[in-house]
Image (cartoon, rainbow, N blue to C red):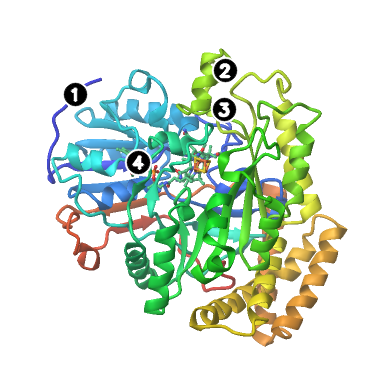
Amino acid sequence: MREREASGRHKKILLSGVFGPFGVDDDYGRRENIMELFHNQVTREQGVASFRFHHRSFGLYFLAENVDADVTVLDFPSRERFVRELRNGYDIVGISFIAPNFVKAREMARLVRVHAPGAVVVLGGHGAAIEGVERLIDCDHVVKGEGIAWLRRFLGQDPDAPLVHPVLPSTERQSILGVPLTGVCSSLLVPGLGCVNGCRFCSTTHFFGKTYTSYLPTGRAIFEAAARISDERGTDTFFVMDENFLKDTGRARDLLAEMERERRFFRFQIFSSAEAILAFGLDDLVRLGVTFVWMGVETKSREANFTKNRGVDPKRLVRELRDRGINVLASGILCMEHHTPENIQEDIDHLVDLEADFTQFMLLTPLPTTALYLEKKASGLLRQELPYEEWHGQKMLNYDHPHFPGEAPERWIRRAFRQEHEENSSSIYRVTDTACRGFLRLAGMRHRDGCLEARLTQARERAAEYALILPVIGRHAVNGLERERVADLGRRLTAALGKPGLRDRALRLVVRLCAARWRWRVKWLGDGIQPATILTRYPAGRAANSPAAPASFPRPKVRNRRRRSRAAAVGIR
Ligand code: B12
Ligand code: SF4
């Protein structure tokens, strides 16, 4: 490793995500490793009904916003675009990557040496946990864990200065059934990083040392950040990127109190463990404005499961959440140590039987350097010869499992996704059903205070938006069961909301045309979608470390080579 001196705000920094194309078989990646959360590991077998959207490399924007220097963030570049950017001359080049993108990061570091030989190369993100990465990639620094404090220290700036939360959309170009979910998508909110629970397979808890780094430590801080972002972006909905948001029950309660006091009722899509959800209380979740929760169910086996799921009846919990209008994503792990071809189906059935809105199946993947990884390595079971490109958990096992050799894991995971789709119907049908159930429950309450009145208005809007897409869901149903369910839901929605007016009927026609176009596209050209390259420049002198800064910052300049979406047809809330 070469050590170079660096300091101060006069530095020119390039922060880049790894290069595309993504989700294709080439020298740097694999077809299964799609750069889309749902199409990768949740709705991937739902055909044209799969939810499609991209997430930016959020960590880079947090870094850029919180140091005082000329920073350029380059997201989803091509290899050539990255090289072109390097030629603009940089003092520091930071590369963010995860384990399956190891080869891309190595190639990018090599390109820096060739095209910007004076630059300091810094590696960060979860890929930095790879053992010996300092030797495997030609770089100057490897940042394991939280990056803002590190970068500030590296630049000679105050690592403890207040944090400025960037203003960002949570997703890029959302669509379902080819229908663009236009309008303003939800915003990103990162209250903190890491999780204290320490589940043995979990990368996030281990990467941040089984601690929680709070970016927004109080309910008030979250409220203020949400209000600022909401004012700037014009939406009250947030995707909360925090591994276990409700774990800090007190902070979530304070946030609810702040919203009630200020009479501003934001909505949140969150990740949370079952124990934390139950500790917070389901009715309070509705008051808090939670519309989506990602919950790790993991496995049916009581012995193999984790403390977070002790004593929880997941089926009842999922039903009660959906009855309250809260979409549930239940995630499960396949090819765990206790699984055999005889009992794995029981776990798949268990997850399917939960009837969550979404189900994620993931193969047990010991990632560096979780407790699971260290155990497998110590017992000689880790497949260290398997290229990191395959370590994404959707095709192969990266450890030797006596009962699942060769292609068996791939067959099981595909079968699980298909069964889930056929028995539970498409996720977009389920989401619409949940929206209807939540609205009816709120509407049926005898007494509603101001907070619940606001939630009722939001629930009505949401149900009405989904109702627009219902005919198209029926048309693309996976089987007769889904068609029947859609027809029944259509009747319930009409009873709840009334018959669609002229405007809604016109919008339904547009939705149908979009869906037909998408079906044609998938049939003839495949369903691959590459994220657009996004370039954002943050000039120095933005007073990034000032607590009073947010309102007065000159906004960063953004260039996105795809056009912004057109007028609102359907908006997911
Ligand atoms: C958003 C996200 C995605 C997005 C990626 C968006 C993108 N443009 O890259 C999507 C949904 C597409 C995605 C896909 C996948 N992901 Co993902 N993803 C996440 C998630 C949920 C949040 C990351 C995030 O934004 N956090 C918030 C920001 C602020 O924190 P951060 O990124 O950690 O950044 C901080 C530090 O890490 C550090 N840092 C980060 N980069 C850099 C760079 C430099 C130079 C420096 C100095 C510091 C630094 O500083 C930042 C501020 O402190 C994490 C889980 C998690 N909660 O962390 C998983 C996670 C990163 N993903 C993971 C995986 C495995 C995948 C997939 C393979 C899917 C899968 N099968 O699971 C695919 C791969 C797609 C691909 N082709 O690359 C793993 C990575 C494991 C590992 N050890 O490498 C994680 C940890 C999930 C998990 N627990 O397994 N993912
Ligand atoms: S509760 Fe979730 S985020 Fe926390 S350690 Fe366990 S799996 Fe990871």
Disc 4 target residue: 16
- In the displayed structure image, the side of residue 88 where residue 58 appears, left or right: right
Mark 3 vs mark 1, CA separation in Å:
32 Å
Residue at 61% x, 78% y is 460
Give above or below for 211 relative to 99.
below
Mark toward the start of the polypeptide (1 vs 2)? 1
Residue at 28% x, 32% y is 122
Is there a contact, CB below 8 Å, between mark 2 and mark 3? Answer: no
Mark 1 vs mark 2, CA separation in Å:
33 Å
- Picture quarter containing residue 40? top right
Tell me if residue 70 can be seen. Answer: yes
Residue at 70% x, 18% y is 402
Mark 1: give few (<14), some (14-19) or many (20+) Cα within 10 Å: few
Disc 1 target residue: 3
Mark toward the start of the polypeptide (2 vs 4)? 4
Give above or below for 366 relative to 480.
above
Of marks 3 and 4, the one in the foreground:
3
Mark 2 vs mark 3, CA separation in Å:
11 Å
Residue type highlighted by circle 1: Glu
Is there a contact, CB below 8 Å, between mark 1 and mark 4? Answer: no
Q: Nearer the viewer, residue 66 or 89?
A: 66
- In the displayed structure image, the side of residue 108 where residue 65 appears, left or right: left
Residue at 52% x, 71% y is 287
- Picture quarter containing residue 144? top left
x and y percentages locating residue 75 in the rendered image: 39, 46
Disc 2 target residue: 383
Q: Secondary structure at mark 3?
A: helix
Residue type highlighted by circle 3: Glu
Mark toward the start of the polypeptide (2 vs 3)? 2
x and y percentages locating residue 423 in the rendered image: 81, 52
Mark toward the start of the polypeptide (3 vs 1)? 1
